[in-house]
Amino acid sequence: GDPLSPYLFLIVTELLTALVQHSISSGMLKGLKLSINGPVLSHILFADDSLFFLKAGTDQAGFLMSILEKYKLFTGQTVNLQKSAVFFSRNTSDHLKRSICNALNNIVSHRSTKYLGLPLGIGRSKKQVFDYVLNSVKSKITSWKSQMLSSSGKEVLIKSIIQALP
């Protein structure tokens, strides 16, 4: 399509980043440290997917909704709350979880959501979580066996597909 479209999308995404960073620098939003000496992480953006990392609190949820509302007002882009989910640490009380979900317009809290093709809620059994990747590779290999490819062609095809899988 239009060669200008990706650049317009990047400019609009920069606005969302600026809104989040302003809220953090003003002390309204509080990101998370994923390790003791690590940096504070507040958000990750990739194409039209966004992940926000915030301290569990209804005030944080309200500030985030305010940012998303400003983003909608400035850009005309709407966040699809039907495709949104919220995750909590195991230390978050059920009461606080419900309050935060309500503040986020009743977004559902569950662990089965994927981000960029990978599951976000990885529990104790990583084998169970990533079995679908292995099954996907196996099914693709089975379908390739029926195609007429040289052995070197199959090798190139397998390597490229495995690298492309999440």
Image: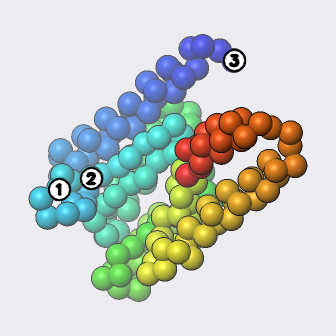
Amino acid at pointer 3: Gly
Amino acid at pointer 2: Leu
Amino acid at pointer 1: Gly
Of residue 7 and residue 59, the one placed in the foreground of this image is: 7
The residue wearing badge 3 is: 1
Residue at the spot x=56%, y=14% of the render?
4
Q: Where's residue 165, x and y in %?
A: 59, 49
> SS of the residue at dot 1?
loop
The residue wearing badge 1 is: 38
As measured in the structure, the alpha-carbon distance from the residue carrying label 3 to the one carrying label 2 is 34 Å
Determine contact: label 1, label 2, CB under 8 Å.
yes
Between circles 3 and 1, the one closer to the viewer is 1
- Residue situated furthest front in the rendering: 151
Q: Which mark is residue 41?
A: 2
Of residue 62 and residue 8, the one placed in the foreground of this image is: 8
Q: Is residue 70 above or below residue 75?
A: below
Residue at the spot x=61%, y=61% of the render?
133
